Image (cartoon, rainbow, N blue to C red):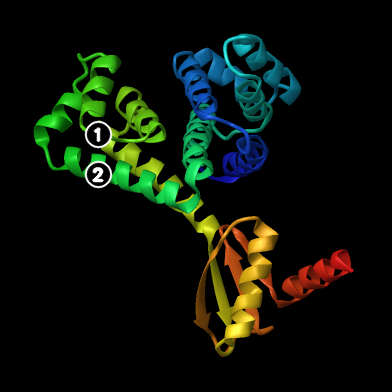
Amino acid sequence: MAGVSSESLAAAQQQLESRLATADLSLAEDLFTILSLLDGNAGLRRALTDPARDGKDKAALLSRLVAGKVSAAAEATAADLAAARWRSARDIGDALEVLAATAAVAVAERQNGVEGLDALEAELFAFTEVVGGSHDLQRALDEPQASAEAKRTLALKLVPEASEPAKLLIGQAVSAPRGLKPVELVRRFNELVAHRQQRWIAHVSVTRPLTAEQSTRLQAGLNNLYGRELTLNVSIEPELVGGIRVAIGDEVLDASTIARLGELRRRLAS
């Protein structure tokens, strides 16, 4: 996905974040349900990605089709996508798949923080290892004559102790791989887990080693700013301009930004 589609997905991901704080697994399930609707209707996909059609009109069209069948949060998320611009009819479905999987991953994160993400990553990896090492399982999960439910049942027997988010993602991958091998789609879902894990790691670059006091103060400040217990990964870069840079997920804070945040906290505390 590139160009305008990539920009639309990025905007949709930001909008989704505001709904994830209180969302449960039903949001992911509902988004996958809408994805099934789009995948089964080429005319609808073309209508929702028609550049000549007004965004509000496209959002209203999708809302009419799913209203009352999914949650309000899922309807709003899908409507956001429909209102955006897309390079191709395929891209809107790909974006919806990413958002649905992200919602499932966020449930694991909300339940147990970074440990929940680590566990989910291990569960998905275990599935890919088992299936990847068996030609018989690969053939069974790729069998075009087998029903989606039969494939889901087989897949979940391989991971009986998996968490509900893992079962949902694995079940989705084997029942609706959307042109990919199921194992490949599970690997893509795991990339989303890895990306979300980065939200818990602060990559700190400094020109010289931090003292214990500086490290403690920086840790406390970042934990307070992001509302979670971050892991500091510190590297020394003597040529760094500004003295310090912190990267957390997709966000980068430089020395001036960190100074302004520190000053703001001091003013709020006074």
Query: Callout 1 environment at 10 Å: few (<14), some (14 to 19), or many (20+)?
Result: some
Measure how far apart labels 2 and 1 are at the Cα level: 8 Å
Q: Residue at x 59, y 88 (%)?
A: 211
Q: Residue at x 56, y 74 (%)?
A: 204
Marked residue nearer the N-terminal end (2 or 1)? 2
**Residue 205: x, y in percent?**
56, 78
**Residue 248: x, y in percent?**
58, 62
User: In what quadrant of the picture does the C terminus appear?
Assistant: bottom right
Query: Callout 2 environment at 10 Å: few (<14), some (14 to 19), or many (20+)?
Result: some
Residue denoted by label 2? 126
Residue type marked 1: Val
Q: Is residue 114 left or right of residue 248?
A: left
**Residue 225: x, y in percent?**
69, 61
Q: Are marks 2 and 1 in contact (CB under 8 Å)?
A: yes
Q: Which mark is residue 159?
A: 1
Q: Residue at x 13, y 42 (%)?
A: 133
Residue type marked 2: Ala
Callout 2: SS:
helix
Q: Nearer the viewer, residue 171 or 164?
A: 164
Q: Is residue 206 above or below residue 198?
A: below
Total numbered badges shown on the rendered structure? 2
Visible residue check, residue 181: no
Q: Quadrant of residue 24?
A: top right
